[in-house]
Image (tube, rainbow, N blue to C red):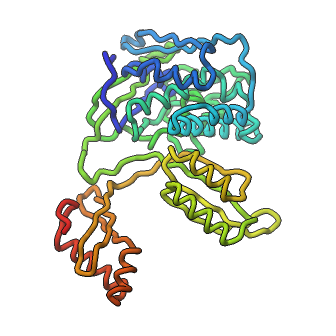
Amino acid sequence: MSGSAPARSALALVDCPTGLAGNMLLAALFDLGLPLAAVQQPLAALGLEGAYRLRLEERRSGGLRGQHLEVELLEAAPAHRLWRELRLQIAAAPLEPELQQRVLAVFEQLAEAEGAVHGHGADQVHFHEVGAVDALVDVVGVCAGLLHFGVEQLVCTPPPAGHGQVRTAHGLLPLPVPAVLELAQRRGIPLASSEGFPPGELTTPTGMALMAALATRFAQAPPLRPRAVGIGLGSRALDRPNLLRLVLADGAEDSAGATRWEPLLQQQAQIDDASAEDLAFLQEQLRAAGALEVYSQPVQMKKGRPGTLITVLAPPELAEPLRQVWWQQGSSLGVREQLLQRWALPRQQLDLQTPWGAVRLKRSQRPDGSWISKPEADDLMELARIHQLPLAELRRRVLARLDAGADGPDGAP
């Protein structure tokens, strides 16, 4: 157990040899030194202060130490709510934008999976299926904890899901429970074998939804240098240590061209009642509000109407400012949102002085050390007009000058 919170780490590994559960993930974060306030403050912002108590204690499982977390509910019978109501509660809470987006993404995964297995839409999923107080504590706590430690790339080993039966609000269900299988199928998540385990649930829907929404990939541990290890213990007694390990680490290869993982917000709306001018202006305003990409596609909508699908990619923290643009400049009555992940090469912008004038360039470095360079099209077009040069020829000359004068960003002429 860490005596104090370790430094922030962009890479983390979730090693789950005996399965995934929200309380195990949160216990591992506390074992790493996560302050209680980092979890309690966002939960209070959701109106849950006084609705729960965290019972965290160091225990042993199979001779190995770790932290065990129990969420004790202080409400005798929490009211049932639909997912659409819970979504509004989370969206309206004064949470940090990135935390809010991650919490919504986890619950969206869970609600869609529960809705699919019960044969109705996600909005009709009841509170007890995705929004019980203990699930809110686990989801908000894990999302807040990963943000606290600066985790950007999260790798999760394939979890075993369990076998046999489990008693739920819907009666006896086979294991893995349907929602866990649905989440695994939707995200293409590999499940480790449960052969050799005693009958019982090893991976819960909440634990699987957290990793389905937050993990970069599911695989065995990549090359890494461990910096700190947190251990979360499960409640069941198994024939082996029942634990989950959360490893904060540095990548084994720390080259300048190493790719990085980053969260990405996607917003979409289909529109069939706006003019071309209105659509162009909407997209222009979305770009002006900070969107990284805005693009449109023709789609066929109801009653055979031609329409346009507009897609926006942006940093998660710009979700609300972009929504305001949609409401002010768009005609859609709704905007879909989901949190994506992407791998990106490190990039920079240069100002290259040439005989024809200054040209801005974007440069990215591949993991093998080579560079990709792209001059700004607007600068090239302006200089091509001034000097009466073919655009392709000017581009070739600019790139040749860059290659001749610099092998890297600091040597650009």
Residue 202 visible in the displayed image: no
Image coords of residue 38 (percent x, y): 46, 23
- Residue 20 drawn above or below residue 347: above
66, 349: nearer the viewer: 349
Residue at coordinates 31% horizontally, 15% vertically from top-left?
3
**Residue displayed at 35% across by 85% down:** 386
Establish if 402 lies above or below 95.
below
Name the image quarter holding the N terminus. top left
* Residue drawn at x 27%, y 64% as measured from the top left: 371
Which picture quadrant has residue 393?
A: bottom left
Q: Is residue 402 above or below residue 327?
A: below
Q: The C terminus lies in which quarter of the figure?
A: bottom left
Quarter of image, res 163: top right
Q: Quadrant of residue 93?
A: top right
Residue 204 position in % (x across, y down): 58, 27
Residue drawn at (36%, 88%), measured in percent from left and top? 390
| Of the pair 196 and 59, the residue shown nearer to us | 59
Query: Please, which residue is most extreme toward the bottom here?
Result: 388
Q: Is residue 69 visible?
A: yes
Side of 286 where 346 appears, left or right: left
